Image (tube, rainbow, N blue to C red):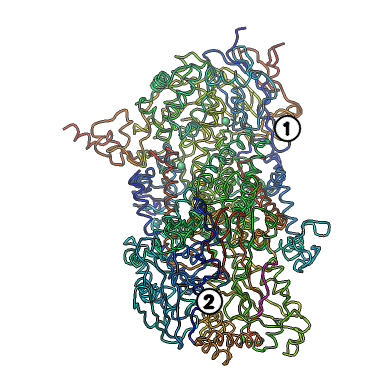
Amino acid sequence: MSGNSIGMGAGAPLPAEALAPEKSKGRARAFFRKFCKQRLALIAACFIILLFIVAAFGPFLTPYNPDTPDYDALMKGPSAAHWAGTDEYGRDILSRLIDGTRLTMAVSLSSVLIAAVFGTILGLLSGFYGGWWDRLIMRGSDVLFSFPDLLLAIGIVAILGPGLSNVVIAVAVFGIPSFARIIRSVTLSAKQTLFVEATRSMGAKNSRIIWRHIFPETLSSIIVNVSMRIGGAILAAASLSFLGMGAKTTEPDWGAMLSMGRDYLSIAPHIVYFPGLTIFLAVLAFNLVGDGLRDALDPKTKN
Amino acid sequence: GSNSNNNGAASGGSSSASPSQTTETSSGASGKGITIAINTNIITLDPHNASDTHSISAARTMYEGLLGFDENMNLIPVLASDYKISDDGLTYTFTLRDNVKFHDGTDFNSAAVKANIDRILDEKNNLRLRKSFLKVAKVETPDDKTVVFTLSEPYNAFLNKVAMAGMISPKAIQEEGADIAKKPVGTGPFVFKDWTQGDRLVVEKNPNYWQQGLPKVASVTFRSVPENGSRIAMLKTGEADFIYPMPTEQVSQVEGDKNITIDKTESTIVRYVTLNTTKKPFDDVKVRQALNYAIDKDAYIKVVKSGLGVKLNSTMSSKTQYYSEQPGYDYDPEKAKQLLADAGYPNGFNAEIWGENDSETIKGMQFIQQQLAQIGVKLDVKSMEGGTLSDMINSAKTPEESKIQMWYVSWSPSSGDADGATRGLFSSSMFPPAGSNTAYYKNDNVDKWIEDANKATDPEKAKSIYADIQKTIWQDAPWMFMGVDQIISGSRSNLSGVKVFPDGSINVLNAEVK
Amino acid sequence: MTQHLLEVEGLKTEFKRGGGSVTAVAGVDFHIRKGEVLGLVGESGCGKSVTSLSIMRLLKDTPGKITGGSVRFEGTDLTKLSEKDMRRARGNDLAMIFQEPMTSLNPVLRIGLQLTEPIMLHLGYGRKKAREHAIHMLKLVGIPRAEEVIDEYPHQLSGGMRQRVMIAMAMSCNPKLLIADEPTTALDVTIQAQILDLMKRLKEEQEMGMLLITHDLGVVAEMCDRVVVMYAGRVVEEAPVQELFSNPKHPYTKGLIQSVPKLRQKVRRLESIKGNVPDLSQMPPGCKFAARCPFAMEKCVASEPELIPLAGASERKSRCWLTQDEAVEGGDRA
Amino acid sequence: MKEKETPLVEVKNLKKSFEVKKGFLGRSQPLNAVDGISFAIRKGETFSLVGESGCGKSTTGRLVTRLLAPNEGEVWFDGRNISRLSDNQMRPVRKNMQMVFQDPYASLNPRMKVKDLVAEPVLIHTRLSAKERDKLACELLETVGLNSRHAERFPHEFSGGQRQRIGIARALSVRPSLIVADEPVSALDVSIQSQVLNLLQDLQENYGLTYLFISHDLSVVEHISDRIGVMYLGTLVETAGKETLYERPLHPYTQALLSSVPVPDPTVKRERIILKGDLPSPVNPPTGCRFHTRCPSCMEICKRRAPIFREVEPGREVACHLYDEEMMKLERK
Amino acid sequence: MGRYALQRLLGVIPLLFVVSVLVFLFIHLIPGDPARLIAGKDATLDEIQGIQRQLGLDQPLWRQYIDYMGNTLRGDLGNSIRSGLPVTDLLGSSIMPTVWLTLLSMAWALIIGLLIGMVSAVYHNRWPDYVGTLVSISGMSIPGFWLGLVLIQVFSVELGWVPTGGVDTWRSYIMPSLTLGAGIMSMIARYSRSSMLETMREDYVRTARAKGLREYLVVGRHALRNSLIQVVTVAGLQFGFLLGGSVMVETVFSIPGIGRLLVDSILYRDYTVIQALLLIFAAQFILINLLVDLLYGVLNPKIRYS
Ligand SMILES: Nc1ncnc2c1ncn2[C@@H]1O[C@H](COP(=O)(O)OP(=O)(O)OP(=O)(O)O)[C@@H](O)[C@H]1O
Ligand SMILES: Nc1ncnc2c1ncn2[C@@H]1O[C@H](COP(=O)(O)OP(=O)(O)OP(=O)(O)O)[C@@H](O)[C@H]1O
Ligand SMILES: [Mg+2]
Ligand SMILES: [Mg+2]
């Protein structure tokens, strides 16, 4: 083909490698390198992986049956037998923490994911189509924003009845408007990018533009926000427990342990310290990872 | 014979209302004020409309009724110095105390009483107290110091109801209208000073109080402090002189503290689990009895109540009128299993237990769940927010529609009367939504006895009828009988005289700071 | 030899990147005389801006660091100055104009404040006097309504006006050296013509030296006295402007000049330099231009030529094996 | 003759305004980005639009490709009025008109492989299988001077010039008849710029392409165009064949523009026409002739009345009162 | 400015309307009958129906809404279903404590958060940055009620420095605002850090350096203002959450604020109070958004002057 030599001058054709220096490690690899650079985030990520393992294999890891009471060993402080002591029923706190990992992670993860899915869809629609859609969704999120979280939570839990899934929904609903807003703003700027305009000029359908071109742009904000919000969701679920609107009250979850134990703060502080510490560490870890992800995904921060 | 003041009207034998002022000191009015931290908000200061204990406590600092209660929930005379009941139990004649003035300076007299009863009965006002006075056919005031109530039918608990009705200055009723709920004017030991709902109520010493030498503190401040930990912190720091309720979990911790005194009294609050007797498997009395045998109530008191409570030995607390102790239902899991097997459930069954979502209730339900698991009964614990729960229970219009199986709940008769502790819970006319008979318990004898007891004018007769009632219900076991709460309050050691009555109301009349 | 206003010798600047570091500027030498305009041309990424930032020591917020060479300004080595002394020189003796007039002014501060900052700092004027001076400077760069503009915000000005403000700011303390990094690239031709006109005029009035960085050979031809051509962090050719255009020595310079479409040139096809600029992190060992050079020989790939003064012309240097034989015998090799 | 003369693109009195918010206090005002322009592009020809930043070149390009809907006026493409088509109706038309953008960094989705980028229009408009698309992508890459080995890479691994080639390959993939190139070389270095310009010229020859070429660089435009339209503040002030325009610019703006271009030859000393002032804001453009505020030969009438864009000699249109004989006559009276 | 504000305020009316309808529907959808809840467990059906009649709860929903809206528009928010007190009284006494609480929380959170953010940005990737990041992330990882309880335990009970709660003196507000502000502080610290980092890369910061300005001027004058613009937006949003989210802190520290009022009202289905509160929350949210916009304009001359 004639174009072959275009612009290549008179000399012998150069090997392709000379044209584009070989650095095709891929974005994923680069991202991974960047992320691993951040010590704190890396440690936090390891901790989170540990949490997931504990959540998956919880029942096999507990030293005691987390639900068996021991009325002769109520509120015993940490000891060799009970590393984290026992609670007001004489149950082993460590076992309950381990067992509670699953529920806590399930609630926080699923609520954030639900929020992310709905928020992303709404944000994409609102940002991409603008106009009527946008106004509707944004006003809707205004309304949700101006609704106190608590009322929503109580309302949802009250309407749907108590239980795990409804707490998940309640926590998720808080998250939807902020996800929608974040994704909307990313969408708005992605919509302005030249490559989206280029795709439009090719005659692509909107669905293709949204899913193939804009959605990937929002992914990094989604990931970052999900990881940041999981921490918030753990706290939110704990707060719901504090107000007596928690998930299943009989199965251990950290927030319930913390809020049920708070009456014992001055007499058996370990009942609160251990769940409190666990929550703190988990939330901290998710936040650190979120931070790390953001830095690693942000094209502006070089290495 | 005529039944007059069975509690000894003239004597004032109880400490609380003693007019004999041996302890009178000038230092009593030394200008000290006290602060009382309570767990919920005061809702209203209208004595005719208050239904929650703290509002009642607050109203009672400023208002007094013709009668009152002592710390054992016995009736004592207050604004009435004496009363008589006719043999047919339809006419109640009260003689009013002399020289009592409202805070606004107007006289307390029979016209004032009539004005108050009129206010209560006026349908437009829709006051909580109205239902207690519905049987009042007329109120007469033959003279300034005498009031005669005529009832349409005998009403055994009437005196208790009279004790609930604080007397408001008729002038204030006239002038303030609905605002009286914010600006109380009564005859009580304290005068209204300031009230911010949700925060505090401040009342000051009434210098013209009819009981000489009382009150002994310059003012009382009620503050609402919902969080248990904060309330006890206030007691420790001295920001509060008295707290109620004292969180049971913390009692052991402050018991050694010489600055803090813990006071415990048995209450009229009973805790139990209703079993829907129209639903399988609870329709079988053996199952219900088995459940009662399956609970280690000592452990229940120890774990759930932190050791501060007593077992429930009847359908009501020992502090309630006409209480009669019942034997049995000692912890016996073997017997429980046997009974279950006899009833055809050798392997137990699955059921739901409902309850509110406060930590105390949740704790109790968890305990019950653990206990019943021992006999093969697997409970699904559902804790719900109060309003939702109430809807779940009351949306069933007939027993057939009812979804409720087990409900872990507490009950306290508002004026310590046996009728209040029985009718609403066990009369077959009180199935939800009409009443709180959530066990859907129906026993024709019990139904009849409740009516009889209500009409009985002779206390002895009433007592025996209530004994039958309690015995029958105990055997029928529509409930799992759990416990009676102890009322636990904490106070600074230099404060005396503040008492919490079995119904949970706080009495500050004799408060004194040393 | 007379002392030059600015003498850059062997300047080397490296950037940390990933694990290692890349050399963005690899031993650059040039000098500027008083009242002279030196053009610095070269392709994007060849290190022009880094050179200028290194001279000003403004690499603070980048991973970059000067790792060798000297920058002598009126005899003092700027690279050895304390940060404090360097601050005193910046904005005072040495001033700089950046490429982007849109982003180089702080959007939330009034023009007046931004203009008077260096005046108060370096000339020690009071607020009022500084303001008068600022207005004077604005008038000098041809801004109408100077008294009003001084109280406006950058976004209220057009691009050309902003670049004038930047120039006024740079000139306000009578710098001896003005570094202008692509001062007109972001502007339209008609505005560019105005600004270039202005800079020429000011330079003549103020007698200052100027380092003009650009990739536009047209601008070079109009403005500069001498030109330094950079390629891949190195100076490849240095020449007086006339000679550079009439007789470019280095193949890169030749290619560059030939690949620019010129008005009314009427060629069918443009010449072009094949290939691309090499990546900084993977520099070939020999002549950095060898891969694109139509005259590349084996020698070129193997080893790198030095920048050597050429015989026959004053102040001409070239970094090419082809021109080595033209080198001044025993000339002062850099 | 008529059939032969049917232009590929015909733009008639095209207008487009944007609503812009003035600050957060003000109401939105119309910004007339393109204010009544007309031109035609014949098949196989390169028509260029030049002008200063913000004069509406890109907007025109986006109107022609119907990325924007005009407020007024018509765009005829291949004998069909496309200015009122819906998005769905427009989609098949797009197969025949593709775009190349100024910024080769931003116009390629960084997350897609080169082969997918290049074949995306094919995916959209045809039913070729993935394999066939890959094969086509490789061919196209070779056409634009890249290598099929580049197909598996991501755009960030390429230099600016190479990316622009990818962009061009993408535009070529569906064999369009029109390519609208919006500043395709202005982000590139001179040495690379010439490679791309040459490529564009070669492709035009080989495939009989028609270009609408948008640029602010007069030298580049002269090199590549057949005919040129000069824009100022949303209007066309002059269109002419390349030769005539550069030899003998008529409109004072064109003259100034030409004289402002720095010539890379230190020996040439020209008399410059330096315009005074800045480009006025398109939100409230000057009355009368839009150029009159900066025009060196401004007359009274220019301030009052906008000149009509009219043919002054065959193939040459100007909007200037200087060439408006009737007006001149009126003026003299 | 005034007209803009007015315009915005007027634009709020439809939103408030929608909110009011939604709120109305929502709280009536929540199971629970206020009449029953007020009447108490031992109430009779008659009594409950009496209350329902009195409160108009036996009317169809649309009727109730119209009555309610009619009264609201006339400025009559009605009486609390539960206590019979005028809703305006209840609001009047509970708004100020919450306002003080949130203002104080916001104030310290802004100051400390900005400080941490700035230090972190200036010492990017050096130890002050790490410390700042850790502090700020910790701040958002602690459950609020837990922090409050611990603070009370330490500073009131053990040390006796500050009251455990209430609203008696300004000292009562110290711990609550610390507790409430911790999360916001962290947010602000993190946002200001990243926006400062971004700003420090801007050309005009380089210009400022090129003038020979001292570092503190470069940061304090040239970078800070620009970062503030972004931080203000975040802070404004947080402010809304603060007001709504003070429930826990008000409970722990016995502050008679609107958060607690809301919880109590919800628990008792005190419709009139809930409705009024929610309208206030919505109005407050909108007002804060407006304020943020105005502040945005003050900080950002581009918006102010064009
Ligand atoms: N902050 C930085 N961090 C890392 N590398 C940098 C930085 N600034 C510049 N570089 C590298 O230094 C090299 C030279 O850049 P420089 O900005 O000096 O080029 P330039 O000649 O000014 O190009 P242009 O004409 O595009 O402005 C480039 O390869 C660039 O990648
Ligand atoms: N989507 C839009 N909304 C508002 N104004 C716009 C929009 N697009 C373009 N404009 C305005 O319309 C005018 C013309 O813009 P256009 O992009 O067509 O100019 P241009 O000639 O391509 O300029 P440049 O050379 O800078 O690319 C400009 O003033 C621009 O600000
Ligand atoms: Mg540069
Ligand atoms: Mg453009």
Q: Residue at x 22, y 36 (%)?
A: D327
Label 2 CB less than 8 angstroms from ligand 2: no
Using the rendered image of the protein, determine whether residue C332 is visible from the camera's viewpoint.
yes
Identify the chain of the residue marked 1, using the numbered disc in the image.
C
Q: Within 10 angstroms of label 1, few (less than 14), some, or many (20 or more) residues?
A: some
Label 1 CB less than 8 angstroms from ligand 1: no
Q: In the image, E299: left or right of B337?
A: left
Q: Which residues are magenta?
A: B307-313
Using the rendered image of the protein, determine whether residue D168 is visible from the camera's viewpoint.
no
Q: Amino acid at mark 2?
A: Asn
Quadrant location of ligand 1?
Answer: top right
Q: Nearer the viewer, residue B441 or A252?
A: B441
| Residue B262 figure quarter | bottom right
Q: Within 10 angstroms of label 2, few (less than 14), some, or many (20 or more) residues?
A: some
Does D252 appear in magenta?
no
* Residue carrying label 2: B7
Residue C139 vs B256, above or below: the answer is above
Image quadrant in which the C terminus of chain A is located: top right
Residue C87 vs B48, above or below: the answer is above
* Residue carrying label 1: C284
Q: Position of residue C117 (x, y in %)?
A: 48, 24
Does B312 appear in magenta?
yes
| Residue B291 figure quarter | bottom right
Q: Residue furthest bottom?
A: B444
